[in-house]
Amino acid sequence: MFDSDRLHPTESEEDWDGQSPDGRPATCQAFHWVPEAREHIPQRFWMLERRFIESYMPQDELHDEKQDAAEAWARLTDDQRWFFNMKEGFRKDAKRDDACRARDLFANVSEEDRNALSGGFGKKLADRFQRRPDHNFNWDVAAIAEARREIPNLMRLL
């Protein structure tokens, strides 16, 4: 199981060539891991459909971290939420050499919401999953559907 590291939904398509819109190779580790996984552990891996494991954090959990950022995050579209830099926000992604990979995904985000999300939710957001192993998270419908498709692949590792 590994993050997709994608910055835009089109990078999740089978025919994505690993290039940024400006023609340079994208810095996306998962792009290189998928062929390796297919070769060595076919049908026994799960590349997350969303950018990071943090991208699956339920909204009610985010409210406990940063309420104004959680409210701004909730106003994003599904694709925007799934490819947003949950840990370090818009500010960090703007500094990337390959920031153009996000294309116009966040073009319609208001300045107020952009400011609320500028720093993300912190580098330790995923720790929330580990700190509460017995907690029944309020997963969204798409996350549940993805898990139902992919968990059998992980079970093949046993």
Image (cartoon, helix red, strand yellow):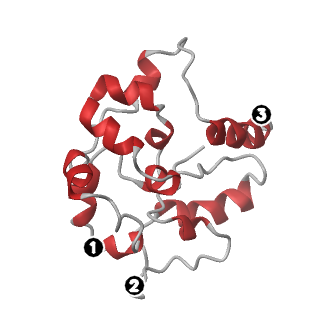
Query: Mark 1 and 3 residues: CB-CB less than 8 Å, in contact?
Result: no
Q: Quadrant of the C terminus?
A: top right
Query: Mark 2 and 1 residues: CB-CB less than 8 Å, in contact?
Result: yes
Snapshot quadrant of residue 22: bottom left
Residue 46 in the image: state x and y as whole percent: 66, 47
- Residue bearing the label numbered 1: 97
Dot 2 alpha-carbon crowd within 10 angstroms: few under 14, some 14 to 19, many 20 or more: few
- Residue 119 is tagged as none
**Amino acid type of disc 1?**
Asp
State which tag comes first along the sequence, 1 or 3.
Answer: 1
Query: Mark 3 and 2 residues: CB-CB less than 8 Å, in contact?
Result: no
| Mark 2 → mark 1, Cα distance in angstroms | 10 Å
Say what secondary structure mark 2 lies in.
loop
Q: Quadrant of the N terminus?
A: top right
> In this image, 96 relative to 40: left or right?
left
Residue at point 46%, 24% (across, down)? 129
Between 36 and 2, the one nearer to me in the picture: 2
- Residue bearing the label numbered 3: 155
